[in-house]
Each structure stands twice: as C-alpha cells, then as structure tokens.
Image (cartoon, helix red, strand yellow):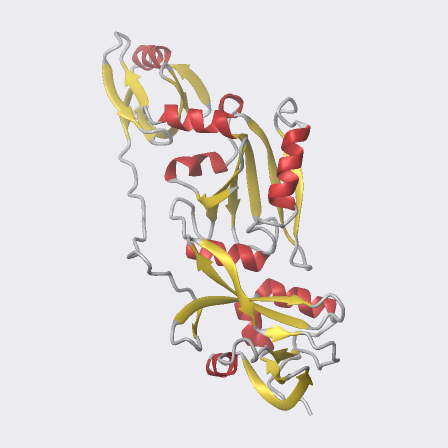
C-alpha cells in the first residue's frame, strides 16, 4: 500500500465527476464521513457502479481505510499531522488531498481537518482505469473550427471563454473525454460538433489564462512547521519536530499523550509522553515517561503544556513524575483527542486550569 499527496492532475478526480468520466475512470463509489466525539472515523458509502463494487473491493476498502491498521485516517489527530506536512494548494482554504493506493484500487481522499463534521470524502476507483484516463488526459483538449483546423489546445480542467453574438460572455470548465470529445461545462461534445454550433450561432471561443498554481517549495530535509508542531530537543542532542496526540487508556480512561513525527512525508509514532501505572489520577493528570525520554519534563514546561504536581510514583525500578496538563493548551494542540477524553470522563471544559493536585 502507498500513501502520498495528490498530484495536480489527480486533484480534479477528488470531486464528484460527470456520468461520462465516472464510467471511463472506473469510479466505484464515494465514502463520505468524519470524526465523531470518540475521535474515530465514521462513514457512509454512496455507490456509483454496482458492477465494480465487488467482494474483492469491499475487502480492500475495509482493510485499507476502515480498519485503521495502516490508515492516516485512523483518527483526526493522525490525519491532521499528515495534512499539515503536505499542504495542497490545488484545494481552497483548509482542504487537503492525498492518494491511498493498493494493488487494484486507488482512493483519492479529499479532506478538511479544520471542519467539525463530514470532513472527509474518499473517491474510490479501479486504479488501472483511473491512471489510464489521467495519462490520456495529458494530451490536452483540442479546439478546432468546422474545417478541422486546430485553433488552440488547453489542459484538462482549464477553461474557455465563449463570447455570444449578443455580447454576453461566459467561462466554462472543460474536461478531457478522448481525442475527439470534451465536456464544456455540463455538456458533452464532439470537438467538430462544438465548432459547428459556435459558428452557426456567431459565437467566439478562446482559452482562459489559467490561474498560477501556488506552491510552497522547501529545501530537501526541511520540514514545514505549523502552530501545532513543536520542537523537541532530544537527549541525543538532536531536534525533532513533533505533534501531540491525545487518547485514553482502555482500562481506566485516564489521559494518554503521545507524539508523532513525519518520516518520508508520512506521520509516524515517535514516542509515548505518558505511562499508565494503573493508579487513579485526577483529571488532566498523567505520569510522564521520563524513563525512556528524560527530556520530556523540560519539553512540557518550556512549551507551557504541563506542570509538575510534586507527586511521584514508583513502578519497578523506575520513578515517574505526575504532571497536570493545561487543558486549554491541549485543546489547541489536539482538539479532537481532548474532546474525546473529556467526553469519556464527563469533564466540563471549564475545568483543567493550572491548579496543582494535592
């Protein structure tokens, strides 16, 4: 399985397509969903082609995207860590896109990590069909006159401007179908048919200059820092850019805090900030794993994330400090994880002020 950001060409297929393009690209259906209060992914599948929705596809979809075993969609914090490292300027605002690919299927994920609900849309395709169509579309869309003389050529997804005999002007997005057919707006034309209609109506058509694609180039090895990315100075003298994740321990619902980093463009677990000693602790408190990462205390205090309560707990040969985490700070760093933790423990969001446990 491969996970990577969408290419510019693929971004066009992370939206709903026309019936013609759906058929040519092997569109199977659209998985729409989002993250609930439990921070887990919930979705509904909207079928497009029941002949392609085979048992093999359903098993692949479940294993790849729904089980959470491999997926960057496992929880909202994990998805945010991935998208923050891969800003896609082909989408408006805070929307992002990436491709999850298996042997036979391609899943184009269009998501908005800042939206509260229904923030993920996954377009499911037969990989061979989709990639063949994208490759063919690289030829561009030809516009000719009624005598088959080529006037201009535009890329798939670009626009033309039609000036009607009345003087009215309209711009239309054009999509590649094949060498002799194109969609102009919502209508499918043979390229000669389109030329004849335009000439008969006394209309003119010209290409629209495409808007420049915004890119953010980074030097090799340089990671993008965001407001949720923190610097961890390790015990080995290196500096890591990390993001925090929040969950609860299964056996007692107490606070779990972890770290993720980015390796080869993908989020990877970095380490556990907290450790579960099976001891009852006050809300927003947790024992910090200074045994494996002694640098954690300095990291937590300097970033205003937590403060030492003055309490210690021994486990085996190790002693762990109990820290009170700043709820407001943690809500800003891990909003959905904290929401799930607070709901699971019946906590009022007004709690969590910096008051040392006694």
Residue at figure coordinates x 61%, y 67% from the top left = 246
Residue at figure coordinates x 63%, y 50% from the top left = 68
- In-front residue for pair 261/342: 261
Count the labels in the image: 0
Q: Residue furthest top?
A: 147
In the visual, does 247 lie left or right of 91? right
Q: Which quadrant would residue 283 be assigned to in this image?
A: bottom right
Q: Position of residue 281 (x, y in %)?
A: 71, 81
- In-front residue for pair 193/169: 193
Q: Compared to 292, does 145 lie above or below?
A: above
Residue at figure coordinates x 51%, y 80% from the top left = 294
Q: Which quadrant would residue 184 be assigned to in this image?
A: top left
Residue at figure coordinates x 27%, y 12% from the top left = 145
Q: Quadrant of the C terminus?
A: bottom right
In the visual, does 126 lie left or right of 35? left
**Is residue 241 among what the camera can see?**
yes
Q: Position of residue 328 (x, y in %)?
A: 57, 75
In the visual, does 232 lie left or right of 203? right
Q: Compared to 178, does 329 lie above or below?
A: below
Q: Position of residue 13 (x, y in %)?
A: 47, 34
Q: Position of residue 139 (x, y in %)?
A: 32, 23
Q: Which quadrant would residue 134 be assigned to in this image?
A: top left
**Is residue 228 among what the camera can see?**
no
């Amino acid at each position: 399985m491969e996970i990577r950001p969408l290419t510019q060409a693929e971004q066009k297929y992370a939206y709903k397509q026309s019936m013609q393009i759906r058929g040519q690209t092997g569109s199977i259906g659209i998985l729409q969903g989002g993250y609930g209060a439990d921070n887990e992914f919930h979705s509904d599948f909207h079928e497009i082609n029941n002949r392609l929705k085979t048992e093999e596809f359903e098993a692949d979809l479940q294993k790849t995207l729904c089980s959470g075993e491999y997926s960057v969609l496992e929880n909202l914090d994990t998805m945010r860590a991935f998208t923050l490292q891969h800003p896609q300027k082909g989408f408006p605002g805070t929307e992002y896109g990436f491709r999850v690919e298996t042997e036979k299927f391609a899943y184009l994920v269009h998501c908005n990590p800042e939206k509260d609900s229904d923030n993920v849309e996954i377009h499911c395709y037969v990989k061979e069909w989709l990639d063949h169509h994208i490759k063919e579309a690289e030829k561009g869309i030809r516009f000719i006159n009624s005598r088959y003389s080529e006037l201009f050529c535009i890329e798939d997804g670009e626009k033309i401007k039609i000036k009607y005999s009345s003087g009215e002007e309209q711009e239309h997005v054009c999509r590649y179908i094949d060498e002799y057919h194109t969609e102009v707006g919502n209508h499918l034309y043979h390229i000669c048919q389109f030329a004849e209609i335009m000439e008969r109506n006394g209309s003119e058509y010209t290409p629209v200059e495409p808007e420049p694609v915004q890119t953010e180039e980074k030097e090799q090895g340089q990671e993008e820092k965001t407001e949720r990315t923190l610097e961890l100075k390790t015990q080995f003298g290196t500096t890591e850019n990390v993001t925090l994740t929040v969950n609860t321990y299964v056996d007692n619902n107490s606070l779990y805090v972890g770290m993720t980093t980015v390796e080869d463009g993908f989020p990877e677990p970095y380490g556990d900030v907290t450790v579960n000693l099976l001891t009852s602790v006050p809300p927003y408190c947790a024992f910090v794993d200074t045994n494996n990462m002694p640098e954690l205390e300095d990291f937590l205090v300097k970033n205003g994330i937590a403060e030492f309560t003055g309490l210690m707990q021994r486990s085996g040969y190790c002693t762990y400090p109990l820290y009170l985490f700043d709820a407001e700070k943690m809500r800003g760093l891990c909003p959905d994880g904290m929401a799930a933790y607070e709901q699971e423990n019946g906590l009022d969001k007004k709690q969590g002020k910096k008051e040392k446990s006694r």
